[in-house]
Image (cartoon, rainbow, N blue to C red):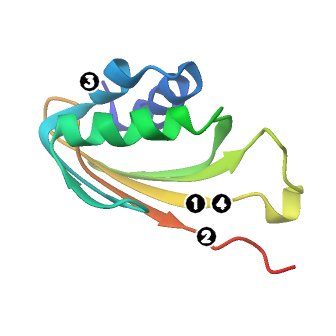
């Protein structure tokens, strides 16, 4: 799997609620840094996503994507409910892909919700 392909595959598995398929994208000792804190290992990452899926539907799309070698940075844009085009990105995700095509490091930069 090419690094450029990983974001779309990742989001397809999120949309499907496929915890095992999602976990299979990560290296066994992957590092995940995000809103839940720091997680280490595929099993911990699968538990995190299982909780996310229990909280409700996850409908997003990949926005602008930059690939530099084994690093992939992409915008995460919600589609349900949709956001205005000028204010659509809710997160920037950084993936580092290993030689086997698995995510070895995943960092989520989450945007704070808009102030009312």
Crowd around label 2: few <14 · some 14–19 · many ≥20 (10 Å): few
Q: Are marks 1 and 2 in contact (CB under 8 Å)?
A: yes
Mark 1 or 2, nearer chain start = 1
Identify the residue position indicated by label 4 in the image: 90
Disc tally is 4
In the displayed structure, 32 sits above or below 17; it is below
The x, y position of residue 36, in whole percent, is 38, 59
Residue 80, x across and y down, in percent = 79, 38
Identity of the residue furthest to the bottom in this view? 115
Which quadrant: the C terminus? bottom right
Disc 3 + disc 4, Cβ < 8 Å:
no
Which residue is depicted at the point 72% across and 46% down? Answer: 78
Pointer 1 local density, CA inside 10 Å: few below 14, some 14–19, many at least 20? some
Q: Which of marks 3 and 4 is nearer the N terminus?
A: 3
Circle 4 crowding by C-alpha within 10 Å: few under 14, some 14–19, many from 20: some
Q: How far apart are marks 3 and 4 (CA)?
A: 25 Å
Q: Are marks 2 and 4 in contact (CB under 8 Å)?
A: yes
| Residue located beneath label 2 in the image | 111
**Residue at (65, 32) in percent of width and height:** 57
CA–CA distance in space, label 4 to label 1: 4 Å
Secondary structure type for disc 4: loop
Label located before the other in sequence (2 or 4): 4
- CB of mark 4 within 8 Å of CB of mark 1? yes
Q: How far apart are marks 1 and 3 (CA)?
A: 22 Å
Q: At x 14% / y 29%, what residue is drawn?
A: 100
Q: How far apart are marks 1 and 2 (CA)?
A: 5 Å
Which disc is residue 24 wearing?
A: 3
When asked about the image quadrant of residue 34, the answer is bottom left
Q: Which of 26 and 74 is in front in this view?
A: 26
Gap in angstroms between the C-alphas marked 3 and 2: 27 Å
109 or 39: nearer the viewer: 39
Earlier-in-chain disc, 1 versus 3? 3
């Amino acid at each position: 799997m090419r690094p450029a392909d990983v974001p779309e595959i990742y989001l397809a598995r999120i949309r499907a609620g496929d915890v095992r398929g999602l976990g299979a994208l990560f290296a066994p000792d992957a590092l995940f840094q995000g809103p839940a804190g720091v997680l280490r290992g595929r099993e911990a990452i699968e538990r995190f996503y299982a909780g996310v899926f229990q909280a409700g539907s996850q409908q997003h799309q990949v926005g602008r994507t930059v690939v530099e070698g084994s690093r992939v940075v992409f915008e995460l844009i919600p589609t349900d409910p949709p956001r205005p085009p000028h204010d659509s990105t809710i997160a920037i995700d950084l993936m580092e892909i290993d030689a086997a095509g698995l995510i070895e490091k995943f960092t989520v930069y989450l945007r704070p919700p808009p102030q009312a």
